[in-house]
């Protein structure tokens, strides 16, 4: 019989990678009639299929208090240890309640055993799995050793215990080859590489009546070149390279549109970008106040658009990141058949570049060859269509739902003995 899966994370809400990819996993699981339920500290999933425990969220005051005393120092007090243990015990009880309430057969911890944003939750999960022997699939997105803020810690024993644990009946999946190698070296744990995916088996939706006026609403003229930077404004996104590229195009019609705000990493980087754009005479358009996770109207009666409303109108997508765990925005650009300028960040070099995509590629700086290719992509429709169609076909081969479906079926069969053929 089909199984009931329980997804576990600190948050299932918004457009972060964990929330997006877990929804895709649930969609693919449903193809074999598996049902999914959700446990988290912050949730936008339907109340009837989810359980929200505020203490499971990384932003809960108790977790913030612990994190202040566990990171950036090498010793912790007995009081901190007691509170960690007490909260872990409470969260473990809520996990038992979640599994009983929904009849869960298999758990899928989504980054909860990977990055220690909520240490009590990781401990609770580890103990729950050791006590019950329940089969589980850990979906690892980014490990603590990939983040410098976790390099000095008073929680090394918790990291060894639960991030991730070496637990029987726990299968490990990672999103890139570097993570697979490091997990094996650091933890002695094998894993299956399952990249982020997209539903390339469906054609991208065309603009509809709601999104038809996107260009006008964000202040672009009819003949402007809409160059889209579909990311938050944080230093690792390398947006200064996109500014330099637009400057070297020397086309007054070119407008660099940044879709999201600066967020929680401060505004100094945004101010630097504004100064650079002014020096380079580049028109920089910030539209973070017009982008939402769902279509709606703001308090001023203005339309708010989703990121998917922007892609069909863009002439070019820039993705000059210096670091990415994978790169969801890259897949989205392929899906909407848009030409892409990309920087050779490490995961791209190892995992994505060998697949054979046709891209305008930076290697840390903007070259004359890249500028020439971008001009050709913008000015020669036949060439642009050839490149975008090629990229769509390659992405469909390597990053479609069918790739995920095969991997999940293999994992489920190994863990439970259940196979879709036995239905």
Image (tube, grey):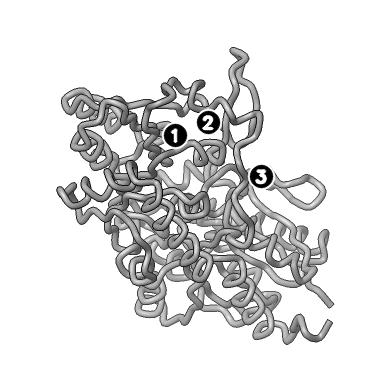
Q: Which mark is residue 291?
A: 2
Q: Residue at x 48, y 42 (%)?
A: 64
Marks 1/2: CA–CA distance: 7 Å
Rendered view: 392 above or below 13: below
Percent from the top left, x then y, of residue 277?
A: 23, 27
Neighbour tally class for label 1: few under 14, some 14-19, many 20 plus, Cα within 10 Å: many
The label nearer to you, 2 versus 3, is 2
In this rendering, is residue 190 above or below 370? below
Give the answer, above or below, for where 216 lies relative to 260.
above
From the viewer's side, name the closer residue of 173 and 405: 405
Q: Are marks 1 and 2 in contact (CB under 8 Å)?
A: yes
3D distance between C-alphas at marks 2 and 3: 20 Å
Tell whether label 1 touches label 3 (CB within 8 Å).
no
Residue 339 is marked as none
Say which residue appears at 16% left-offset and 25% top-offset. Answer: 279
Disc 1, SS: loop
Tell whether 345 sits left or right of 210: left
- The percent position of residue 398, horizontal first and vertical second, equals 49, 70
Q: Position of residue 166 (x, y in %)?
A: 51, 78
Q: Is residue 205 left or right of residue 397?
A: right
| In front of the other: 173 or 344 | 344
Horizontal side, residue 422 vs residue 369: left or right: right
- Closer to the chain start, of discs 3 and 1, is 3
Q: Secondary structure at mark 2?
A: loop
Quadrant of the rendered structure where residue 180 is?
bottom left
x, y percentage for residue 222? 44, 24
Q: Residue at x 37, y 64 (%)?
A: 357
Say which element carries label 3: strand
Q: Which mark is residue 43?
A: 3
Q: Give the mark nearest the N terminus, 1 or 2.
A: 1
Q: Which residue has dot 1 on it? A: 260
């Amino acid at each position: 019989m089909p199984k009931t899966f329980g997804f576990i994370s600190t948050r299932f809400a918004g457009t972060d990678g964990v929330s997006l990819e877990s929804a895709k996993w649930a969609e693919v699981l449903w193809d074999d009639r598996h049902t999914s339920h959700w446990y988290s500290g912050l949730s936008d999933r339907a109340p009837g299929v989810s359980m929200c425990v505020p203490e499971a969220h990384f932003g809960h005051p108790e977790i913030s208090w612990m994190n202040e005393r566990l990171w950036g120092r090498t010793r912790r007090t007995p009081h901190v240890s007691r509170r960690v243990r007490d909260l872990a015990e409470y969260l473990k009880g809520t996990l038992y309640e979640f599994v009983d309430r929904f009849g869960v057969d298999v758990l899928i911890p989504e980054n909860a055993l990977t990055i220690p944003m909520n240490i009590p939750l990781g401990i609770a999960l580890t103990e729950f799995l050791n006590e019950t022997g329940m089969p589980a699939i850990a979906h690892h997105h980014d490990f603590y050793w990939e983040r410098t803020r976790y390099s000095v810690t008073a929680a090394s024993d918790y990291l060894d215990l639960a991030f991730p644990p070496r637990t029987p009946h726990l299968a490990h999946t990672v999103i890139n080859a570097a993570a697979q190698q490091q997990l094996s070296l650091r933890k002695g744990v094998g894993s299956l590489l399952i990249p982020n995916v997209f539903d390339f088996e469906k054609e991208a939706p065309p603009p509809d009546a709601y999104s038809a006026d996107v260009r006008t609403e964000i202040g672009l003229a009819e003949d402007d070149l809409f160059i889209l930077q579909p990311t938050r404004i944080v230093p690792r996104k390398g947006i200064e390279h996109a500014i330099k590229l637009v400057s070297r195009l020397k086309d007054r019609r070119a407008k660099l549109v940044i879709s999201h705000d600066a967020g929680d990493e401060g505004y100094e980087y945004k101010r630097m970008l504004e100064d650079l754009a002014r020096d380079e005479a580049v028109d920089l358009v910030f539209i973070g106040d017009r982008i939402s996770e769902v279509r709606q109207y703001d308090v001023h009666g203005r339309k708010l658009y989703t990121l998917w409303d922007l892609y069909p109108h863009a002439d070019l997508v820039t993705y000059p990141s210096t670091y990415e765990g994978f790169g969801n925005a890259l897949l989205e650009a392929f899906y909407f058949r848009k030409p892409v300028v990309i920087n050779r960040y490490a995961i791209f070099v190892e995992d994505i570049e060998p697949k054979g995509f046709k891209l305008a590629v930076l290697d840390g700086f903007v070259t004359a060859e890249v500028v020439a290719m971008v001009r050709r992509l913008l000015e020669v429709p036949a060439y642009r269509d050839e490149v975008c169609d090629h990229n769509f076909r390659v992405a469909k081969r390597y990053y479609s739902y069918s790739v995920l479906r095969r991997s999940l079926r293999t994992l489920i069969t190994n863990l439970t003995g259940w196979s879709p053929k036995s239905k």
